[in-house]
């Protein structure tokens, strides 16, 4: 499925890898804007699609069964081919991290490495039944979504970024919202990880209560052959790219170096 995407920066002719950013559940490519602005100034071409069912790609299928992790990974793979990227790094946040791993398992031509930010694990994401029910009920409910945004961040977002995150979440399609909570977040893609041959690096928010260091070590690091960096970003919760864009950009640059 063709994805809407935004782009910052340009190929500088040095052979430097382009950066393909995949967003969190409920977000869109816009959630990467603060990081992309920094990385574009530093000479990187940055591309951030709205994944199937989210952002301006939200007018996708109304069939919940079409919103699989592999389906989203296939969409990104097709976008990379369509853009003719010769060398690129996939940077996936939360849901986008699980999609990035699935895409890496396809071994797309030109993929240099994977950077995961507070990634949803390849195994079923730990979530209580009560929290899952609350999130399901919050689809399209501004007050409940505001509550979630405050709950998953360790520091108050600037008002413009908070409003952006709220607006993005409100425009997510209901089938995609339900599909991730009922199926995608529960999918077990561990068998695919044996095919991931590129190096992977991981950063988490030090104050993230859900994607913790223990979870990452147990469910991701232990299952990948080439994890090169694992970092914690101070004073950040789950929305690391919005809470700490400078620190996130620094992590990506260290990975690329």
Image: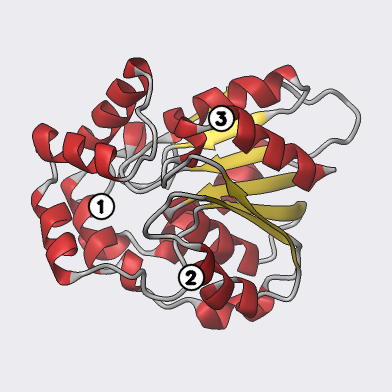
**Residue bearing the label numbered 2:** 215
Q: Earlier in the sequence, mark 1 or mark 3?
A: 1
In the image: residue 252, left or right of residue 32: right
Q: Earlier in the sequence, mark 2 or mark 3?
A: 2
Q: Is residue 84 visible?
A: no
Picture residue at 49% right of the left edge, 57% below the top? 119
Residue 66 x %, y %: 30, 61
Question: Observer-nearest residue: 138 or 101?
Answer: 138
Picture residue at 38% right of the left edge, 19% below the top? 158
Q: Which mark is residue 176?
A: 1
**Residue bearing the label numbered 3:** 245
Examine the rendered structure and indicate whether residue 156 appears above or below residue 21: above
- Give the SS element for disc 3: helix
Q: Earlier in the sequence, mark 2 or mark 1?
A: 1
Residue 95 x %, y %: 42, 54
Indicate which label's residue lies in the foreground, 1 or 3: 3
Indicate which label's residue lies in the foreground, 2 or 1: 2
Q: Is residue 51 visible?
A: yes
Residue 174 x %, y %: 16, 48
Examine the rendered structure and indicate whether residue 226 appears above or below residue 88: below
Picture residue at 33% right of the left edge, 70% below the top? 126
């Amino acid at each position: 499925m063709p994805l809407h995407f935004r782009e910052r920066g340009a190929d500088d002719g040095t052979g430097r890898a382009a950066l393909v950013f995949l967003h969190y559940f409920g977000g869109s490519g816009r959630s990467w804007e603060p990081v992309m602005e920094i990385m574009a100034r530093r000479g990187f071409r940055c591309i951030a699609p709205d994944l199937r069912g989210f952002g301006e790609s939200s007018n996708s299928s109304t069939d919940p069964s079409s919103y699989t992790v592999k389906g989203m990974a296939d969409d990104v793979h097709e976008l990379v081919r369509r853009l003719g990227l010769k060398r690129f790094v996939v940077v996936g946040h939360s849901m986008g991290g699980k999609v990035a791993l699935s895409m890496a398992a396809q071994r797309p031509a030109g993929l240099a490495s994977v950077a995961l930010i507070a990634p949803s694990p390849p195994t079923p994401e730990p979530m209580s039944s009560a929290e899952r029910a609350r999130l399901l009920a919050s689809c399209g409910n501004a007050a409940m979504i505001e509550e979630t945004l405050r709950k998953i961040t360790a520091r108050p977002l600037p008002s413009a970024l908070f409003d952006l995150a709220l607006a993005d979440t409100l425009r997510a399609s209901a089938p995609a919202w339900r599909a991730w909570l009922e199926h995608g977040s529960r999918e077990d893609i561990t068998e695919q990880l044996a095919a991931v041959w590129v190096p992977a690096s991981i950063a988490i928010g030090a104050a993230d209560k859900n994607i913790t260091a223990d979870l990452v070590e147990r469910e991701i690091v232990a299952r990948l052959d080439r994890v090169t960096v694992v970092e914690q970003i101070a004073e950040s919760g789950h929305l690391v790219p919005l809470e700490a864009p400078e620190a996130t950009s620094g992590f990506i640059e260290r990975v690329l170096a």
